[in-house]
Image: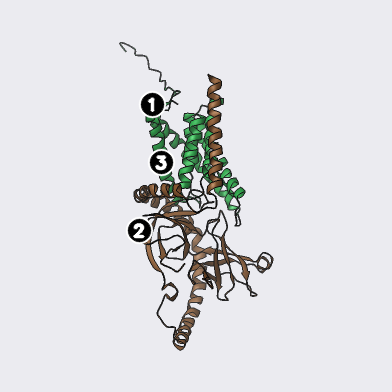
Protein backbone atom coordinates (compact mmCIF):
# COMPACT_ATOMS: atom_id res chain seq x y z
CA UNK A 1 0.00 0.00 0.00
CA UNK A 2 2.79 2.39 1.07
CA UNK A 3 4.93 1.46 -1.96
CA UNK A 4 1.96 2.07 -4.24
CA UNK A 5 1.46 5.49 -2.70
CA UNK A 6 5.13 6.35 -3.13
CA UNK A 7 5.03 5.24 -6.78
CA UNK A 8 1.95 7.36 -7.41
CA UNK A 9 3.60 10.40 -5.83
CA UNK A 10 6.70 9.96 -7.94
CA UNK A 11 4.60 9.60 -11.06
CA UNK A 12 2.69 12.84 -10.32
CA UNK A 13 5.95 14.67 -9.62
CA UNK A 14 7.52 13.38 -12.84
CA UNK A 15 4.39 14.39 -14.76
CA UNK A 16 4.58 17.94 -13.38
CA UNK A 17 8.29 18.27 -14.20
CA UNK A 18 7.83 16.89 -17.72
CA UNK A 19 4.75 19.11 -18.14
CA UNK A 20 6.78 22.20 -17.17
CA UNK A 21 9.52 21.35 -19.66
CA UNK A 22 6.96 20.66 -22.38
CA UNK A 23 5.18 23.97 -21.76
CA UNK A 24 8.51 25.80 -21.80
CA UNK A 25 9.53 24.13 -25.06
CA UNK A 26 6.21 24.80 -26.76
CA UNK A 27 5.68 28.40 -25.63
CA UNK A 28 9.23 29.82 -25.43
CA UNK A 29 9.83 32.52 -28.01
CA UNK A 30 6.29 32.18 -29.40
CA UNK A 31 3.66 34.90 -29.42
CA UNK A 32 1.14 34.53 -26.56
CA UNK A 33 -1.25 31.63 -27.12
CA UNK A 34 -4.87 31.10 -26.12
CA UNK A 35 -3.95 29.88 -22.62
CA UNK A 36 -1.91 32.99 -21.78
CA UNK A 37 -4.51 35.29 -23.34
CA UNK A 38 -7.26 33.49 -21.40
CA UNK A 39 -5.50 33.74 -18.04
CA UNK A 40 -4.61 37.36 -18.80
CA UNK A 41 -8.25 38.24 -19.59
CA UNK A 42 -9.47 36.38 -16.51
CA UNK A 43 -7.11 38.13 -14.13
CA UNK A 44 -7.14 41.69 -15.45
CA UNK A 45 -10.57 42.67 -13.95
CA UNK A 46 -9.50 41.20 -10.60
CA UNK A 47 -6.19 43.02 -10.83
CA UNK A 48 -8.04 46.27 -11.55
CA UNK A 49 -10.09 45.89 -8.38
CA UNK A 50 -7.05 44.82 -6.32
CA UNK A 51 -5.04 47.75 -7.70
CA UNK A 52 -7.61 50.31 -6.53
CA UNK A 53 -8.16 48.61 -3.17
CA UNK A 54 -4.45 48.33 -2.38
CA UNK A 55 -3.42 51.82 -3.54
CA UNK A 56 -3.49 53.42 -0.06
CA UNK A 57 -1.31 50.64 1.38
CA UNK A 58 1.06 50.90 -1.59
CA UNK A 59 1.32 54.66 -1.18
CA UNK A 60 2.16 54.23 2.50
CA UNK A 61 5.02 51.79 1.82
CA UNK A 62 6.25 53.97 -1.06
CA UNK A 63 6.24 57.04 1.20
CA UNK A 64 8.62 55.35 3.65
CA UNK A 65 10.89 54.14 0.86
CA UNK A 66 10.93 57.50 -0.91
CA UNK A 67 11.74 59.33 2.33
CA UNK A 68 14.88 57.21 2.71
CA UNK A 69 15.84 57.69 -0.92
CA UNK A 70 15.15 61.45 -0.97
CA UNK A 71 18.12 62.16 1.29
CA UNK A 72 20.64 60.80 -1.17
CA UNK A 73 18.83 62.19 -4.17
CA UNK A 74 18.90 65.79 -2.97
CA UNK A 75 22.57 66.37 -3.81
CA UNK A 76 22.27 64.72 -7.20
CA UNK A 77 19.24 66.83 -8.12
CA UNK A 78 21.04 70.05 -7.17
CA UNK A 79 23.90 69.31 -9.54
CA UNK A 80 21.43 68.26 -12.23
CA UNK A 81 19.56 71.55 -11.81
CA UNK A 82 22.73 73.51 -12.40
CA UNK A 83 23.53 71.71 -15.62
CA UNK A 84 19.85 71.91 -16.69
CA UNK A 85 19.93 75.72 -16.30
CA UNK A 86 22.91 75.92 -18.62
CA UNK A 87 21.22 73.61 -21.12
CA UNK A 88 17.96 75.60 -20.92
CA UNK A 89 19.71 78.78 -22.00
CA UNK A 90 21.33 76.95 -24.90
CA UNK A 91 17.97 75.36 -25.69
CA UNK A 92 16.21 78.74 -25.94
CA UNK A 93 18.70 79.85 -28.55
CA UNK A 94 18.30 76.59 -30.45
CA UNK A 95 14.49 76.95 -30.39
CA UNK A 96 14.63 80.41 -31.92
CA UNK A 97 17.01 79.21 -34.57
CA UNK A 98 14.86 76.14 -35.22
CA UNK A 99 11.69 78.23 -35.65
CA UNK A 100 13.44 80.41 -38.22
CA UNK A 101 14.78 77.42 -40.13
CA UNK A 102 11.37 75.67 -40.12
CA UNK A 103 9.77 78.73 -41.65
CA UNK A 104 12.45 78.78 -44.28
CA UNK A 105 11.82 75.18 -45.40
CA UNK A 106 8.03 75.23 -44.89
CA UNK A 107 7.94 72.62 -42.17
CA UNK A 108 6.18 74.67 -39.55
CA UNK A 109 3.21 72.40 -38.88
CA UNK A 110 3.06 72.95 -35.14
CA UNK A 111 4.40 70.90 -32.24
CA UNK A 112 4.56 67.10 -31.91
CA UNK A 113 5.33 66.67 -35.59
CA UNK A 114 6.63 63.19 -34.97
CA UNK A 115 3.56 62.08 -33.07
CA UNK A 116 1.00 63.21 -35.65
CA UNK A 117 0.32 59.61 -36.73
CA UNK A 118 -0.27 58.45 -33.15
CA UNK A 119 -3.21 58.89 -30.86
CA UNK A 120 -2.23 58.70 -27.18
CA UNK A 121 -4.59 56.82 -24.84
CA UNK A 122 -4.04 57.17 -21.10
CA UNK A 123 -4.26 54.17 -18.77
CA UNK A 124 -3.24 52.89 -15.40
CA UNK A 125 -0.82 50.13 -14.37
CA UNK A 126 -2.75 47.39 -12.55
CA UNK A 127 -0.13 44.67 -12.14
CA UNK A 128 3.57 44.03 -12.32
CA UNK A 129 5.78 40.97 -12.75
CA UNK A 130 7.41 39.68 -9.55
CA UNK A 131 10.89 38.91 -10.91
CA UNK A 132 13.53 41.12 -12.47
CA UNK A 133 13.91 38.63 -15.33
CA UNK A 134 10.51 39.47 -16.75
CA UNK A 135 10.06 43.20 -16.54
CA UNK A 136 6.45 43.64 -17.58
CA UNK A 137 3.36 45.47 -16.38
CA UNK A 138 -0.33 44.94 -16.99
CA UNK A 139 -2.34 48.05 -17.88
CA UNK A 140 -6.10 48.64 -17.92
CA UNK A 141 -6.23 49.44 -21.65
CA UNK A 142 -6.89 46.80 -24.27
CA UNK A 143 -8.11 46.15 -27.78
CA UNK A 144 -11.41 47.88 -26.92
CA UNK A 145 -9.43 51.11 -26.41
CA UNK A 146 -7.62 50.77 -29.72
CA UNK A 147 -4.45 49.27 -28.26
CA UNK A 148 -2.59 46.85 -30.53
CA UNK A 149 0.49 44.69 -30.10
CA UNK A 150 3.75 46.67 -30.61
CA UNK A 151 2.22 50.05 -29.73
CA UNK A 152 4.82 52.23 -27.93
CA UNK A 153 4.08 53.09 -24.28
CA UNK A 154 5.27 56.29 -22.60
CA UNK A 155 4.95 57.94 -19.22
CA UNK A 156 5.09 61.67 -18.50
CA UNK A 157 8.89 61.41 -18.37
CA UNK A 158 9.72 59.30 -21.38
CA UNK A 159 9.58 55.94 -23.13
CA UNK A 160 8.46 53.01 -20.98
CA UNK A 161 8.16 50.04 -23.33
CA UNK A 162 6.05 48.29 -25.91
CA UNK A 163 2.69 46.48 -25.85
CA UNK A 164 3.48 42.75 -25.94
CA UNK A 165 -0.04 41.43 -25.88
CA UNK A 166 -3.53 42.94 -25.85
CA UNK A 167 -6.85 41.52 -24.70
CA UNK A 168 -10.27 43.18 -24.62
CA UNK A 169 -9.78 45.37 -21.57
CA UNK A 170 -6.14 44.94 -20.63
CA UNK A 171 -2.67 44.68 -22.13
CA UNK A 172 0.77 43.51 -21.10
CA UNK A 173 3.62 45.95 -21.64
CA UNK A 174 7.21 44.77 -21.95
CA UNK A 175 9.29 47.41 -20.21
CA UNK A 176 12.62 48.85 -21.31
CA UNK A 177 14.20 46.87 -18.45
CA UNK A 178 13.04 43.48 -19.78
CA UNK A 179 15.79 41.27 -21.18
CA UNK A 180 14.00 41.01 -24.52
CA UNK A 181 13.82 44.79 -24.95
CA UNK A 182 15.96 46.59 -27.56
CA UNK A 183 15.26 50.10 -28.82
CA UNK A 184 17.18 51.87 -31.58
CA UNK A 185 18.23 55.24 -30.22
CA UNK A 186 20.40 58.26 -30.83
CA UNK A 187 22.33 60.58 -28.55
CA UNK A 188 21.61 64.31 -28.53
CA UNK A 189 23.47 66.41 -29.45
CA UNK A 190 25.78 64.59 -31.82
CA UNK A 191 23.45 61.97 -33.22
CA UNK A 192 25.50 58.89 -32.28
CA UNK A 193 23.26 55.87 -32.82
CA UNK A 194 22.94 52.59 -30.97
CA UNK A 195 20.59 50.12 -29.37
CA UNK A 196 19.30 50.65 -25.83
CA UNK A 197 19.25 47.45 -23.79
CA UNK A 198 18.59 46.81 -20.11
CA UNK A 199 21.14 46.04 -17.42
CA UNK A 200 19.22 43.19 -15.81
CA UNK A 201 18.80 43.62 -12.07
CA UNK A 202 19.25 47.39 -12.10
CA UNK A 203 16.07 49.27 -13.11
CA UNK A 204 17.92 52.59 -13.03
CA UNK A 205 20.54 51.61 -15.55
CA UNK A 206 20.27 51.03 -19.30
CA UNK A 207 23.07 50.33 -21.76
CA UNK A 208 23.43 52.01 -25.13
CA UNK A 209 25.19 49.38 -27.19
CA UNK A 210 26.79 49.40 -30.67
CA UNK A 211 27.50 53.11 -30.82
CA UNK A 212 27.99 54.19 -34.40
CA UNK A 213 29.90 57.44 -34.05
CA UNK A 214 33.40 58.73 -34.29
CA UNK A 215 32.72 61.28 -31.56
CA UNK A 216 32.87 60.47 -27.88
CA UNK A 217 29.70 60.69 -25.82
CA UNK A 218 29.67 62.49 -22.47
CA UNK A 219 27.65 62.21 -19.28
CA UNK A 220 24.51 64.35 -19.23
CA UNK A 221 23.64 63.94 -22.91
CA UNK A 222 20.07 62.93 -23.71
CA UNK A 223 19.14 59.73 -25.52
CA UNK A 224 15.98 59.60 -27.66
CA UNK A 225 14.41 57.04 -29.99
CA UNK A 226 15.97 57.01 -33.45
CA UNK A 227 12.76 56.09 -35.30
CA UNK A 228 14.49 54.82 -38.43
CA UNK A 229 12.81 53.86 -41.67
CA UNK A 230 14.27 51.75 -44.50
CA UNK A 231 11.97 51.07 -47.47
CA UNK A 232 8.99 49.09 -46.09
CA UNK A 233 10.61 48.51 -42.71
CA UNK A 234 10.29 51.06 -39.93
CA UNK A 235 11.05 51.26 -36.23
CA UNK A 236 8.08 50.61 -33.93
CA UNK A 237 8.92 53.82 -32.08
CA UNK A 238 8.44 57.32 -33.50
CA UNK A 239 11.61 59.43 -33.56
CA UNK A 240 12.42 61.76 -30.68
CA UNK A 241 10.79 59.97 -27.74
CA UNK A 242 12.98 60.69 -24.70
CA UNK A 243 14.56 57.54 -23.24
CA UNK A 244 17.18 58.62 -20.74
CA UNK A 245 20.29 60.57 -19.85
CA UNK A 246 23.86 59.32 -20.19
CA UNK A 247 25.33 58.70 -16.73
CA UNK A 248 28.57 56.84 -17.39
CA UNK A 249 30.55 57.24 -20.59
CA UNK A 250 34.23 56.55 -20.20
CA UNK A 251 36.22 56.85 -23.45
CA UNK A 252 37.88 53.49 -22.68
CA UNK A 253 34.54 51.68 -22.39
CA UNK A 254 33.30 53.36 -25.56
CA UNK A 255 36.34 52.19 -27.48
CA UNK A 256 36.58 48.70 -25.97
CA UNK A 257 32.95 47.60 -25.79
CA UNK A 258 31.18 50.37 -27.73
CA UNK A 259 28.72 51.14 -24.99
CA UNK A 260 27.67 53.85 -22.53
CA UNK A 261 25.30 53.69 -19.56
CA UNK A 262 22.17 55.77 -19.13
CA UNK A 263 19.45 56.33 -16.56
CA UNK A 264 15.90 56.12 -17.93
CA UNK A 265 13.86 59.32 -17.64
CA UNK A 266 10.76 57.29 -16.75
CA UNK A 267 10.57 55.92 -13.22
CA UNK A 268 10.29 52.33 -14.40
CA UNK A 269 10.11 50.89 -10.87
CA UNK A 270 7.13 53.03 -9.83
CA UNK A 271 4.92 53.36 -12.88
CA UNK A 272 1.31 54.35 -12.31
CA UNK A 273 -0.14 56.31 -15.24
CA UNK A 274 1.04 55.59 -18.78
CA UNK A 275 0.07 56.52 -22.33
CA UNK A 276 -0.16 54.06 -25.21
CA UNK A 277 0.59 55.65 -28.57
CA UNK A 278 -2.05 53.95 -30.70
CA UNK A 279 -2.68 54.05 -34.41
CA UNK A 280 0.90 54.34 -35.62
CA UNK A 281 1.98 52.91 -38.96
CA UNK A 282 3.14 49.28 -38.80
CA UNK B 1 -3.32 17.22 5.09
CA UNK B 2 -6.58 15.69 3.90
CA UNK B 3 -7.47 17.46 0.66
CA UNK B 4 -11.26 17.37 0.34
CA UNK B 5 -13.00 19.34 -2.44
CA UNK B 6 -13.68 22.10 0.07
CA UNK B 7 -10.02 22.30 1.05
CA UNK B 8 -9.02 22.20 -2.62
CA UNK B 9 -11.19 25.26 -3.24
CA UNK B 10 -9.62 27.00 -0.24
CA UNK B 11 -6.10 26.27 -1.53
CA UNK B 12 -7.09 27.58 -4.98
CA UNK B 13 -8.51 30.76 -3.42
CA UNK B 14 -5.34 31.23 -1.36
CA UNK B 15 -3.26 30.87 -4.54
CA UNK B 16 -5.37 33.41 -6.46
CA UNK B 17 -5.34 35.84 -3.53
CA UNK B 18 -1.57 35.45 -3.18
CA UNK B 19 -1.08 36.08 -6.89
CA UNK B 20 -3.28 39.19 -6.87
CA UNK B 21 -1.48 40.55 -3.82
CA UNK B 22 1.87 39.91 -5.49
CA UNK B 23 1.00 41.50 -8.84
CA UNK B 24 -0.97 44.47 -7.51
CA UNK B 25 0.84 45.22 -4.28
CA UNK B 26 4.17 43.56 -3.50
CA UNK B 27 5.62 43.85 -7.03
CA UNK B 28 4.68 47.53 -7.10
CA UNK B 29 6.31 48.63 -3.87
CA UNK B 30 10.04 48.78 -3.35
CA UNK B 31 11.87 48.67 -0.05
CA UNK B 32 15.54 49.64 -0.46
CA UNK B 33 15.04 49.34 -4.22
CA UNK B 34 13.78 45.75 -4.20
CA UNK B 35 10.22 44.41 -4.36
CA UNK B 36 9.28 41.50 -2.06
CA UNK B 37 8.29 38.23 -3.75
CA UNK B 38 5.77 36.40 -1.57
CA UNK B 39 4.81 33.65 -4.01
CA UNK B 40 7.78 31.34 -3.27
CA UNK B 41 7.04 31.83 0.46
CA UNK B 42 3.37 30.96 -0.12
CA UNK B 43 4.35 27.77 -1.98
CA UNK B 44 6.78 26.84 0.81
CA UNK B 45 4.05 27.31 3.43
CA UNK B 46 1.60 25.17 1.42
CA UNK B 47 4.30 22.51 1.15
CA UNK B 48 5.04 22.70 4.87
CA UNK B 49 1.39 22.34 5.82
CA UNK B 50 0.22 19.96 3.13
CA UNK B 51 3.28 17.85 2.33
CA UNK B 52 5.40 17.34 -0.77
CA UNK B 53 2.65 16.62 -3.27
CA UNK B 54 0.45 19.52 -2.20
CA UNK B 55 3.51 21.80 -2.37
CA UNK B 56 4.49 20.56 -5.81
CA UNK B 57 0.99 20.83 -7.30
CA UNK B 58 0.46 24.27 -5.70
CA UNK B 59 3.86 25.46 -6.98
CA UNK B 60 3.16 24.22 -10.49
CA UNK B 61 -0.29 25.86 -10.57
CA UNK B 62 0.85 29.18 -9.09
CA UNK B 63 3.77 29.26 -11.55
CA UNK B 64 1.38 28.64 -14.43
CA UNK B 65 -0.88 31.46 -13.22
CA UNK B 66 2.03 33.93 -12.91
CA UNK B 67 3.33 33.21 -16.39
CA UNK B 68 -0.16 33.18 -17.84
CA UNK B 69 -1.29 36.43 -16.25
CA UNK B 70 1.84 38.22 -17.47
CA UNK B 71 1.65 36.53 -20.88
CA UNK B 72 5.16 35.09 -20.58
CA UNK B 73 6.42 31.70 -21.81
CA UNK B 74 4.68 29.07 -19.70
CA UNK B 75 6.55 26.52 -17.62
CA UNK B 76 9.60 28.39 -16.25
CA UNK B 77 8.03 29.62 -13.03
CA UNK B 78 6.09 26.34 -12.65
CA UNK B 79 9.29 24.32 -12.80
CA UNK B 80 11.02 26.38 -10.12
CA UNK B 81 8.03 26.71 -7.78
CA UNK B 82 7.05 23.04 -7.97
CA UNK B 83 10.61 22.19 -6.96
CA UNK B 84 10.62 24.36 -3.86
CA UNK B 85 7.05 23.32 -2.92
CA UNK B 86 8.03 19.68 -3.07
CA UNK B 87 11.26 20.32 -1.18
CA UNK B 88 9.45 22.16 1.64
CA UNK B 89 6.94 19.33 2.03
CA UNK B 90 9.65 16.68 1.79
CA UNK B 91 11.75 18.35 4.49
CA UNK B 92 8.74 18.51 6.79
CA UNK B 93 7.81 14.85 6.16
CA UNK B 94 11.37 13.55 6.44
CA UNK B 95 12.63 15.48 9.43
CA UNK B 96 9.37 16.33 11.25
CA UNK B 97 10.48 19.95 11.59
CA UNK B 98 8.90 21.91 14.41
CA UNK B 99 9.52 25.28 15.99
CA UNK B 100 8.55 28.90 15.62
CA UNK B 101 11.43 29.73 13.28
CA UNK B 102 11.02 26.78 10.91
CA UNK B 103 8.51 28.51 8.60
CA UNK B 104 10.35 31.85 8.27
CA UNK B 105 13.76 30.21 7.90
CA UNK B 106 12.52 27.77 5.27
CA UNK B 107 10.74 30.62 3.47
CA UNK B 108 14.00 32.57 3.41
CA UNK B 109 16.19 29.68 2.27
CA UNK B 110 13.78 28.37 -0.35
CA UNK B 111 12.96 31.86 -1.67
CA UNK B 112 16.68 32.29 -2.26
CA UNK B 113 16.72 28.94 -4.03
CA UNK B 114 13.68 29.95 -6.10
CA UNK B 115 15.27 33.26 -7.15
CA UNK B 116 18.44 31.40 -8.12
CA UNK B 117 16.23 28.95 -9.99
CA UNK B 118 14.48 31.74 -11.92
CA UNK B 119 17.91 33.14 -12.82
CA UNK B 120 19.18 29.70 -13.90
CA UNK B 121 16.11 29.07 -16.09
CA UNK B 122 16.43 32.46 -17.78
CA UNK B 123 20.18 32.18 -18.31
CA UNK B 124 19.73 28.67 -19.72
CA UNK B 125 17.11 29.93 -22.16
CA UNK B 126 19.45 32.73 -23.21
CA UNK B 127 19.47 36.32 -22.03
CA UNK B 128 20.42 38.81 -24.71
CA UNK B 129 21.35 41.62 -22.34
CA UNK B 130 24.02 42.40 -19.75
CA UNK B 131 23.29 41.18 -16.22
CA UNK B 132 24.02 43.59 -13.38
CA UNK B 133 25.68 42.51 -10.14
CA UNK B 134 22.73 44.14 -8.40
CA UNK B 135 20.88 40.92 -9.14
CA UNK B 136 22.71 39.46 -6.12
CA UNK B 137 21.35 42.25 -3.91
CA UNK B 138 17.90 41.58 -5.34
CA UNK B 139 18.09 37.87 -4.46
CA UNK B 140 19.44 38.50 -0.94
CA UNK B 141 16.88 41.18 -0.07
CA UNK B 142 14.00 39.13 -1.49
CA UNK B 143 15.09 36.23 0.75
CA UNK B 144 15.29 38.54 3.75
CA UNK B 145 11.78 39.88 3.08
CA UNK B 146 10.57 36.28 2.79
CA UNK B 147 11.89 35.65 6.31
CA UNK B 148 9.78 38.49 7.74
CA UNK B 149 6.72 37.73 5.61
CA UNK B 150 6.97 33.95 6.08
CA UNK B 151 5.54 33.89 9.58
CA UNK B 152 2.34 35.90 8.89
CA UNK B 153 1.80 33.91 5.68
CA UNK B 154 2.23 30.67 7.62
CA UNK B 155 -0.23 31.76 10.32
CA UNK B 156 -2.82 32.95 7.76
CA UNK B 157 -2.64 29.84 5.58
CA UNK B 158 -2.66 27.51 8.61
CA UNK B 159 -5.78 29.24 9.89
CA UNK B 160 -7.50 28.92 6.50
CA UNK B 161 -6.62 25.23 6.18
CA UNK B 162 -7.07 24.25 9.83
CA UNK B 163 -9.91 21.73 9.25
CA UNK B 164 -7.68 19.72 6.93
CA UNK B 165 -4.56 19.65 9.06
CA UNK B 166 -3.80 16.29 10.64
CA UNK B 167 -0.91 17.34 12.80
CA UNK B 168 -2.26 20.54 14.23
CA UNK B 169 -0.03 21.24 17.21
CA UNK B 170 -2.05 21.42 20.38
CA UNK B 171 -1.78 24.38 22.64
CA UNK B 172 -1.59 23.01 26.15
CA UNK B 173 -2.09 25.39 28.96
CA UNK B 174 -1.57 24.26 32.46
CA UNK B 175 -4.44 25.24 34.67
CA UNK B 176 -3.69 26.92 37.91
CA UNK B 177 -4.93 24.70 40.77
CA UNK B 178 -7.98 26.05 42.47
CA UNK B 179 -7.37 26.33 46.14
CA UNK B 180 -10.63 26.07 47.93
CA UNK B 181 -11.13 28.30 50.90
CA UNK B 182 -8.20 30.55 50.09
**Secondary element type, mark 2:** helix
Mark 2: few/some/many CA within 10 Å (<14, 14-19, 20+): few
Name the subunit of mark 3: B
Whole-angstrom CA distance, mark 3 to mark 2, is 26 Å
- Mark 1 and mark 3: Cα distance apart in space: 20 Å
Q: Which disc is residue A249 wearing?
A: none
A102, above or below B132, in the image? below
> Which of the two residues, A84 or A265, is positioned nearer the viewer here?
A265
- Please say if the residues under marks 1 and 3 sit with CB atoms less than 8 Å apart: no
Above or below: residue A233 compared with residue B34: below
Task: Quickly name the residue at label 3.
Answer: B16
Chain letter for the residue marked with disc 2 in the picture:
A
Q: Position of residue A198 (x, y in %)?
A: 56, 59
- Decide which of tag 1 and tag 3 comes sooner along the chain: 3
Tell which tag, 1 or 2, sits nearer the viewer.
Answer: 2
- Residue most toward the left? B181
- Whether residue B26 is visible here, answered yes or no, is no
* Coordinates of residue A7 in the picture (x, y in percent): 56, 26
From the image, tell me which residue sits under label 2: A144
Q: How is the image coloured?
A: by chain
Query: What is the display colour for chain A?
Result: brown
Which residue is painted at 38% across and 58% down in the image?
A143
User: In the picture, which chain is green?
Assistant: B
Amino acid sequence: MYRKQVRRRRAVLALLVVGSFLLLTVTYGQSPGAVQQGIGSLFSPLQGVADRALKPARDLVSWFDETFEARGENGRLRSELESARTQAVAGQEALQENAQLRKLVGLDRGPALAFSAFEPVTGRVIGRSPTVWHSAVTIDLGRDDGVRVDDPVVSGDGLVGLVASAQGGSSQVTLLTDHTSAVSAKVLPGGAQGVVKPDIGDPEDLVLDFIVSARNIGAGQAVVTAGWRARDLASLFPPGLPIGEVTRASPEEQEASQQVHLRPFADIANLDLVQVLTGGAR
Amino acid sequence: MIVTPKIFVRIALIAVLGLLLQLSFFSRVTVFGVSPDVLPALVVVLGLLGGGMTGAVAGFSIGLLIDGSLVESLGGSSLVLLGIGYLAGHLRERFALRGALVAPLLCMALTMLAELGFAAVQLTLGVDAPVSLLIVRDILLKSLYAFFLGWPIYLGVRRALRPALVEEPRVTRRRQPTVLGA
